[in-house]
Amino acid sequence: MNSVDLHRQQVRSDHRTRDIVNQAIAALPEVGLRRAAEFLFAMGVPHPIAMRTLVYPAQRRPSP
């Protein structure tokens, strides 16, 4: 795999992670923090990202 393939793979992963995190954030009021966190962990979102996005909303990256 060359550097271009690695870059493409990373970009896809970032969009996938973004979409998964957005789903968890949208579901937070309905399912609660614990279930949202369980969803993120089950979907392979790294622990620091999951905790930052759910517990510290002020540290979330702005949506484009």
Image (spheres, rainbow, N blue to C red):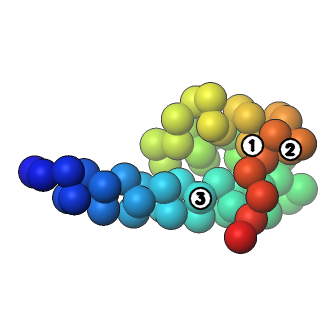
Which residue is denoted by mark 3 in the rendering?
A: 18
Q: Farthest residue in the top direction?
A: 48
Q: Nearer the viewer, residue 33 or 58?
A: 58
3D distance between C-alphas at marks 2 and 3? 14 Å
Q: Tag 1: Cα neighbours inside 10 Å, few (<14), some, or many (≥20)?
A: some
* 37 left or right of 56 in image: left
Asked if residue 1 shows in the view, the reply is yes
Q: Tag 3: Cα neighbours inside 10 Å, few (<14), some, or many (≥20)?
A: some
* 15 left or right of 31 in image: left
Q: Quadrant of the C terminus?
A: bottom right
What is the three-letter code of the residue carrying label 1?
Thr
Which residue is denoted by mark 1 in the rendering?
A: 53
Q: Position of residue 26 (x, y in %)?
A: 79, 63
Instruction: Give me the residue at 59% from left, 58% from top.
Output: 18
3D distance between C-alphas at marks 2 and 1? 6 Å
- Assign a secondary structure to mark 1: helix
Which residue is denoted by mark 2 in the rendering?
A: 57
- Assign a secondary structure to mark 2: helix
